């Protein structure tokens, strides 16, 4: 046991030395990347999005974002597939359990009734304004999912119609890919910005970016909600 | 600058506490606090997009998922 510890400490020290030697070569906090300069100086002009992060995420690196959304989708499907068998078994056992799970407290119920529409509105605001202000589809979707989580905590006996969740999720995924294919048709490459860019700093600007971010917002929001639904063992 | 240093110090303490705690609910709450402080630091580093994602996912959803998992399994870590 002691030799094992000594060996692991030696390996860790070698690793730490390697990291120190590597990172001492890289200048920290200095901008030496030409690509970053290009995005900052040309980003607004080329994409029409004032928020440069959004212009990188959805325009210059739009294909990577599609991959990211796909990864989340596959993770949600995998979770659903793993938890599905357990749900069947629990259904019979949980009948006596249901009597124990009473209502949530009055404060939680009233508070979440008041807050739920506001949280949804805030999430929608974040992803609709993704090209103007910080935030975007992923952040807005996570905020929406946290709103649904609050409702799940406040009303443990009710559940969302799982089918409508998956319909909205699939539709928004299709919109993302469809817009990408339209770009391929109209201007020659996948996810190209074929719509007019408009005036920067206005809501209707930046071409396809707001549309894709709305789709991503819906997709992420409902995907995370269905993940929570699967984990709580409800639905159906 | 000093405020950020204090935040980093608190973050390290909370991260160590998350490992040490035997009650897993406490450990999860410490993790959520680490996420929250991380998002504040992201904001100070002028990355509001990342800060938003960290606050919503790290401090909100992940904590809930961990607590659901703990409720379905065991609350206290066992001594081996």
Image (tube, coloured by chain):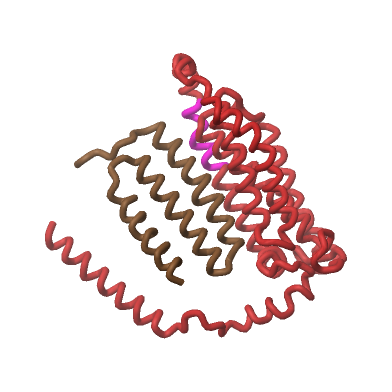
Chain colours: A red, B brown
Left or right of residue A33: residue B12: left
Report which quarter residue A194 is drawn in: bottom right
Q: Is residue A45 magenta?
A: no
Foreground residue among A194 and A99: A99
* Quadrant position of the C terminus of chain A in the picture: top right
Residue at 52%, 25% in the rendered image: A104
The image shows residue A203 at horizontal and vertical percentages of 81, 59
Report which quarter residue A161 is drawn in: top right
Foreground residue among A117 and A50: A117
Residue at 46%, 23% in the rendered image: A89
The image shows residue B70 at horizontal and vertical percentages of 39, 36
Report which quarter residue A106 is drawn in: top right
Left or right of residue A162: residue A48: right
Foreground residue among A230 and B16: B16
Residue found farthest to the front: B2
Residue at 71%, 49% in the rendered image: A173
Look at the picture and state if B72 lies above or below B27: above
Which is the main secondary structure of the residues drawn in magenta?
helix
Look at the picture and state if A18 lies above or below B19: below
Foreground residue among A107 and A7: A107
Residue at 54%, 53% in the rendered image: B55
Q: Is residue A78 magenta?
A: yes
* Quadrant position of the N terminus of chain A in the picture: bottom left
The image shows residue B19 at horizontal and vertical percentages of 31, 51
Task: State the count of labels.
Answer: 0
The image shows residue A151 at horizontal and vertical percentages of 60, 33
Left or right of residue A178: residue B20: left
Chain part drawn in magenta: A77-87
């Amino acid at each position: 046991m002691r030799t094992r510890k000594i060996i692991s400490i030696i390996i860790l020290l070698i690793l730490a030395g390697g990291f120190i030697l590597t990172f001492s070569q890289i200048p920290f906090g200095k901008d030496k990347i030409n690509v970053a300069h290009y995005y900052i100086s040309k980003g607004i002009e080329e994409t029409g999005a004032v928020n440069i992060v959004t212009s990188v995420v959805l325009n210059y690196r739009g294909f990577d974002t599609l991959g990211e959304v796909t990864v989340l989708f596959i993770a949600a499907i995998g979770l659903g597939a793993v938890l599905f068998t357990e749900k069947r078994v629990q259904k019979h056992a949980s009948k006596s359990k249901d009597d124990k799970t009473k209502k949530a407290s009055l404060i939680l119920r009233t508070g979440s009734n008041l807050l739920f529409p506001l949280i949804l509105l805030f999430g929608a605001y974040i992803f609709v304004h993704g090209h103007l202000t910080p935030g975007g589809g992923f952040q807005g979707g996570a905020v929406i999912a946290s709103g649904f989580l609050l409702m799940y905590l406040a009303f443990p006996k009710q559940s969302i119609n799982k089918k409508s969740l998956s319909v909205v999720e699939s539709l928004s995924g299709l919109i993302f890919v469809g817009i990408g294919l339209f770009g391929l048709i109209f201007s020659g490459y996948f996810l190209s910005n074929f719509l007019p860019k408009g005036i920067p700093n206005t809501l209707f600007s930046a071409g396809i970016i707001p549309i894709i971010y709305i789709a991503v917002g819906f997709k992420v929001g409902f995907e995370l909600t269905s993940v929570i639904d699967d984990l709580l063992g409800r639905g159906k | 600058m000093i405020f950020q240093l204090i935040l980093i110090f608190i973050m390290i303490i909370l991260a160590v506490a998350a490992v040490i705690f035997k009650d897993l609910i406490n450990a999860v709450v410490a993790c959520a606090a680490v996420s929250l402080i991380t998002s504040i630091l992201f904001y100070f580093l002028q990355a509001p997009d990342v800060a938003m994602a960290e606050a919503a996912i790290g401090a909100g959803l992940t904590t809930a998922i961990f607590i659901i998992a703990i409720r379905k399994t065991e609350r206290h870590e066992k001594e081996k």
